[in-house]
Image: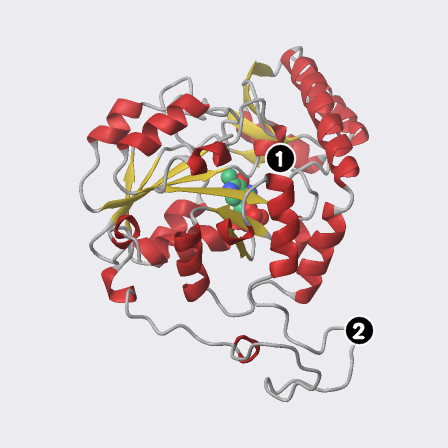
Amino acid sequence: MPEWLEKWLRPDLLHLQPYSSARSEYKGSAHIFLDANENPFEHHGLNRYPDPLQWALKQRIAAWRRVAPEQIFLGNGSDEAIDLLIRLCCRPGTDHIVVLPPTYGMYEVCAHISGVAVVHVPLQADFQINVEAVLATVIPQSKLLFVCSPNNPSGNAFSLAEVEALVQGFPGLVVVDEAYVDFSAQPSALSLLLRYNNLAVLQTFSKAWGLAGIRLGMAFAQPELITWLNKIKPPYNISQLTQEAALKALQRLVQYQDEVRLILQEREQLANALAQLPVVERVFPSDANFLLVRVTDPYSLYNWLVSQGIIVRNRTNVLLCEGCLRITVGTPAENRQLLQALANYR
Ligand code: PMP
C-alpha cells in the first residue's frame, strides 16, 4: 500500500481479510454456476447475484466523466460512500471529521453512528468558507474534511481555487460532495484528482439524473483508495436492477442535459418571481436545483404551504438560515402553483 494512503486509513483495518464473494474466486469463463446457492431457474434475469464491482457500469461512467474505471466506487446512494469513508478513515473515540455548517446533515449523522467526533467550522454569513479557520483547526486526528459544493442548504458552490487551497492545506482526506454539480456554473473538483491523492469527489444519480429511486452514488478517488472502499463495502451493494437502470440512463445523455437546462431556466424564473413577493425578504443565489429563501414568517408560511398540499423544507432552525425555507425547483406547473399559493398567503 502507498505510504500516503496508509496514514489516512484506520490502522486496525490494515489487516482486514475482506469477504470474498463466490464469483470473484475463479478466472476464465464458465457456464454452470453452482457456487453461490442461487435458485437456478430464471426470474426476469434476476436469479443471479449482480457483479459486486459493477464493471460494465463503471466503464460507462468512466467514459462520461473522463476518469479510469478503477477510480470509481459505486454506493447505495452517495450516502453509503459518506458512511464508508468515515468508517475507513476514522478511529471511533479518537479521530474526528471536520464539517462546514450549515451543510448536509448526513456527514455528522454517519460520524455519530460510528462513534466519531465532529468539529464544526461555520461558513461565513455570506456562506463562504473561512479557509484559514478550517486549516487552523487541524490536528493529527482530523481525518476527513467534508466540503459540500454546491452546498446544501445554502445553494452556493465554492470556487475551485478555494477547494484546491483546502486540499493543499488539509493533512487528511478532503471529501468534496458534488451531489448538485450538474446544476452549477463552477467546474467540478474531479480535475484535481490529477494532482492530489487526498481527495474524494462524490456525485449521485439522485438529482440531475432523476433517479433518486434507484439509489446510486459515485465516489471518485485514486484507485488505491477505491480498492479500500471496495474491501469494506457490503459485497453486493448495488442491485442488478440499479445497475441496469443506470446503464440505460447513460444512453440518454441528451434527455439528461435537456432536463438540467429546463431546471436551470425554471430556477431563474422562480428566483425572480419569488423576489417580487411581499413575504420574501431574500432569495439567495443558487448553483443547485433548489433555492434558499428568507421569508417574513417561516413557520406560518410553511404551514400555509402544507395546507395547500405543497411541501418545502423549513430550515429556519439551521445555523445562518434563520427565517429560511429551502425550495426545490419543480416542474413549470408546480412552480406556478407554488407562486400562486405564496401570493394567496395572508
Ligand atoms: N449529498 C448531498 C449534498 C445531498 O443533498 C444528498 C441528498 N439530499 C446526498 C448527498 C445524498 O444523495 P444520495 O441520494 O446519492 O444518497
- What residue is at 51 percent from the left and 79 percent from the top? 25
Quadrant for the N terminus, please: bottom left
Q: Write down the quadrant of residue 228 in the picture.
A: bottom left
- What residue is at 69 percent from the left and 86 percent from the top? 32
> What is the x, y in percent for residue 131?
30, 24
Q: Nearer the viewer, residue 305 or 334?
A: 334
244 sits to left or right of 297:
right
> What is the x, y in percent for residue 123?
36, 26
Q: Nearer the viewer, residue 157 or 285?
A: 157
> What is the x, y in percent for residue 214?
66, 55
> Up-down: is 45 above or below 244?
below
- The residue that mark 1 highlights is 312
> What is the x, y in percent for residue 60?
66, 50
Q: Amino acid at mark 2?
A: His
> Up-down: is 201 above or below 342?
below
Q: Write down the quadrant of residue 238 in the picture.
A: bottom right
Q: Nearer the viewer, residue 87 or 231?
A: 231
Q: Residues within 10 Å of mark 1 (few under 14, many from 20)?
A: some
Q: Residues within 10 Å of mark 2 (few under 14, many from 20)?
A: few
Q: Is mark 2 within 8 Å of ligand 1?
A: no
The outermost residue toward the front is 28
- The residue that mark 2 highlights is 44
138 sits to left or right of 331:
left
Counting residues from the start of the chain, the first of labels 1 and 2 encountered is 2
Q: Amino acid at mark 1?
A: Val
Quadrant for the C terminus, please: top right
87 sits to left or right of 10:
right
Name the mark nearer the viewer: 1 or 2. 2
